[in-house]
Image (cartoon, grey):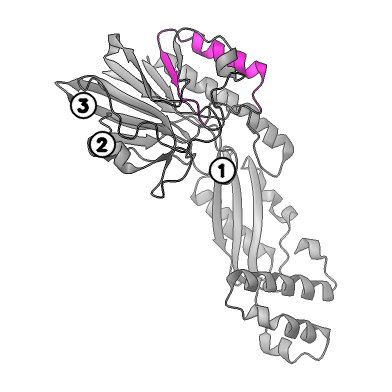
Amino acid sequence: MVKILHCADIHLDAPFVCGDKMKSELRRNELFATFSSMINYVKLNGIDLVLISGDLFESENVTRDTSALLVRAFADNPSCRFVISPGNHDPYATDSVYAKVKFPPNVYIFNSPVLSGLSFDDINVDVYGYAFTSSEMEINPFKGMGPARPGRVNLLCAHGELTQSGKGVCPIDIDDIRKSGFDYVALGHIHSGSEVMKAGDTFYAYSGCLEGRDFGECGIKGAIYCELEKDRCELISNFKKIRFCKRRYEIERVNVSGAQNISDVLPAVKERIEEKEYGRDTLLRVILEGDVSPELVISKSAFTSLEDGLFYLETVNRTRPFYDIEKLANDPTVRGAFYEELKPMLESEDEKERELAYSALKYGLSALGGNNVIDF
């Protein structure tokens, strides 16, 4: 039984995004610790083969220190083979790290956009793959291609985008996988990852990234562990996801309809945090929704008491003030005139236009009432 770890989209040296610059930099450094944890897992669990399906780093940002770290990490695991298929952010080129740095002999890097294969006879495994040689790849290199020796465990290490349109970053159709004849297609490019799925006789999955870098990459991140064996051409398989991320980004929508003041809002947010068991490993964005009192002030400082249990907390106020429209319409002051000016937009069929009008109404009436608009 061969032990395989499939990872991708690690993006070493890439920037992280949250509203706190110091914490963003800390997250960037934590990615290296997460990568080291994965390498330690490889050593402790006797992994035979690591498949890195592209975007190990970002060519524009990669440093000498990162190159040296990679060399040391791979060299410290001489019994494991590391197979890399460069992706659109770390393409193989004459001036790339892949070409300029001398990697240890247990590292195998595909260097051509044409599909090619590697044979590891001692573990009865063949690995196929290809490399992005620029940031774009318009065709799928393994379309209509397949393994030469069906009796072995046949793997494809590939960076690309599953798509029905025929367009994308190395566009891959499910039929390409179904007809390929590989036992497992280890994909990279989609940071959210996927479950291990099957097309025909072929398993396939996106491992996702090791660490989310912003609120577009929510959830627990890691890699896919595989145990594969061929017995008389029949595949015996076992897959499981392994968490490696130190922290996770999460988004929660909390409806606070009817809230009159901030003391009505805080308990609802706290309850959600406790319900989901978010803690110091969590960067949380709370989106507040619902119809609330026009007098309700939602400011960042109001949530300080909830920040201590989290690594990072930010709130997005998408509540709508519940106004007495009839009263506003009959208001003879500038408040009524302001409402009448916005009324066509407030009744628009365009949702974005309505949201914009409600925001304008909220800020405008708050300012007319002598409140600090920033707080709102």
Left or right position of 151 against 17: left
Number of marks drawn: 3
Quadrant including the N terminus? top left
Instruction: Please tell me in which quadrant of the rendered image residue 154 appears.
Output: top left
Q: Earlier in the sequence, mark 3 or mark 1?
A: 3
Is 71 a magenta residue?
yes
Residue with the mark numbered 1: 249
Q: Nearer the viewer, mark 3 or mark 1?
A: 3
Q: Position of residue 71 (x, y in %)?
A: 55, 12
- The answer to whether one can see residue 323 in this image is no
Q: Which residue is drawn at 47% across and 41% down?
A: 192
Observer-nearest of 51 and 110: 110
Kindly indicate whether the residue at mark 3 contacts the one at mark 2 (C-beta within 8 angstroms): no
Residue with the mark numbered 2: 179
The label number, if any, that marks residue 293 in the structure image:
none
Q: How far apart are marks 1 and 2 (CA)?
A: 37 Å
The label number, if any, that marks residue 235 in the structure image:
3
Q: Is mark 1 on a helix, strand or loop?
A: strand
